[in-house]
Image: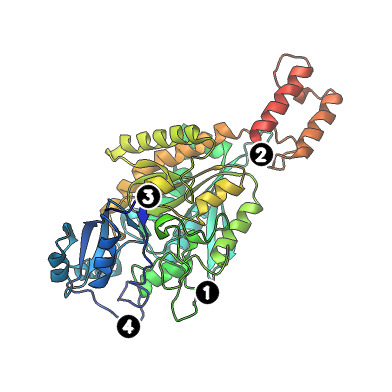
Amino acid sequence: MRESWPVLILAISLFALRSFAQPDARPGEPVVRYDGYRVVSVVIRDFRDVRTLESIGIEPFGCEVRHDQANDFLVPPDRFDALVATGMPHMVTIHDLQPLIDAERVRLSAPIARDASWFQDYKNLSAVEAYMAELAALRPDLVTQIDLGVSLEGRPIKGLRISNDAVDLGRCKPAILLNSIQHAREWITVMNAMFVADHLVRNYDDDAYVRYLTDHAVFYIVPIMNPDGYVHTWTVNRFWRKNRRPNPGGSFGVDLNRNWGYQWGLSLPGGAGGSPFGSSDVYWGTGPFSEPETQRVRDFVLTHPEIKAHNDIHSYGQMILWSWGWSPTPIFNAPEWHDIGQEMNARINAVHGKTYTYGPIYTVIYPVSGSSVDWFYGTRSGILSMSYELRGPNFAPPPSEILLCAQETLPATLFQAEAMIDRYRFIADWNRDCSHDIVDLLDFIADFDALDPRCDLVPDGDLDILDLLEFIQLFSEAR
């Protein structure tokens, strides 16, 4: 009889002690090769299947194991016959992992053609930081570099602020925050975030839609939230997921997307949500916001109340996700989120024909506790927080996927910003401090009593009870 839980979760330590040569590796660094290792897709039918794979030394290639769905597993060469002997249906998706690693290393170590697009292949931390500086220098009227603070190992967490501040709307502009590389091995996500920045900067003058969005909103883009982990994937372990926190017992790393302070540390049905064990790839840390990386982004958001939308970019699986991650209960404005997700998928599909599954994290992918999306939605007045799972077919997609993926998700990301502008017009932010609180209501009443013509919100040329009721309605919706 099959178990009824929706998701089966494993504590994964597969890559914790493994490393291999990477493009930026220094001479003498240890190398562990994966000659003959296969990646296989297995549909997990029940918990017995999980125990069977564990018993013969086969572990997940991803971070979670989903019930009644195809899951990727890494099979050592001396374990493949044991897998066959179990009789479990499976399909080999990568016959030998090491050539894929070697080919990527050689490709990224080769000289870059002078006329090559920046998005032709993956870029390391220094190249990303240099390109952010280049965009800021190209359009200083639109772009400002931002520094959120430093990581556990002292690396700066940098980003861009993109907006045309010369356009004064007479009110606060809502802002959308895009962040990627919470999970270090998901290289395609940093390219995706940088493509948005590149498009806004280079197309402002010639694209009316881009100009409208950049005039009416602020884009904060943090392409590498986990710089320590990202550097580790370029120097030691291509498939490292977490940050580089030393844990008791000799393991390393906290899963930053289990470390946010909303519903942190919940063990959900089937063992889902995260793990209290440091060796696990979904280890949630010693407490909510225990890690400098999540603290830095949290503090940035708390000091920027104009942030009214958010997208946490991940890979892989082709999904558009929103809250809740910790509960199957729908959010209170689920129909609105569904309509936005549906339109985002339609805009993705119109580019290259790809379809992204959309819906709540808990039901579409798997239960998650302590996620960034839930923190943004649950503690920041229900802002428009979403997450992508980009193209695969694994954590090391070929470079040919970079531009295709970025091109198809760009219209969806811009639509999310457009939906934010429509949803948060900030008319009720009467004192223009980018926050809606009782001071706005008191200031409006004072100006209304003083017959300030700005208070004619209906507008009909008169200041009367209709204007006051209109403001109260807007104020209630904003909160």
Q: Between residues 174 and 290, which one lies in front from this camera angle?
A: 290
Residue 172, numbered circle: 2
| Alpha carbon distance from label 2 to label 3 | 36 Å
- Name the N-terminal-most of marks 3 and 1: 1
Residue 47: image location, x then y, percent: 30, 60
Residue 3, numbered circle: none
Measured along the vertical axis of the image, is residue 50 above or below residue 479? below
| Alpha carbon distance from label 4 to label 2 | 52 Å
Amino acid type, label 4 = Pro
Looking at the image, which residue is at 52% across and 50% down? 374
Marks 3/4 in contact by CB < 8 Å: the verdict is: no
Between label 3 and label 1, give the one nearer the viewer.
3
- Name the N-terminal-most of marks 2 and 3: 2
Dot 1 corresponds to which residue? 153
Dot 3 corresponds to which residue? 365
- Name the N-terminal-most of marks 4 and 2: 4
Amino acid type, label 3 = Ile
| Alpha carbon distance from label 3 to label 1 | 32 Å
Measured along the vertical axis of the image, is residue 462 above or below residue 377? above
Residue 196: image location, x then y, percent: 44, 47
Measured along the vertical axis of the image, is residue 406 above or below residue 158? above
| Alpha carbon distance from label 1 to label 2 | 36 Å
Q: Residues within 10 Å of mark 2 (few under 14, many from 20)?
A: many
Dot 2 falls on a residue whose secondary structure is loop
Dot 4 falls on a residue whose secondary structure is loop
Between label 4 and label 2, give the one nearer the viewer.
4
Residue 30, numbered circle: 4
| Alpha carbon distance from label 3 to label 4 | 35 Å
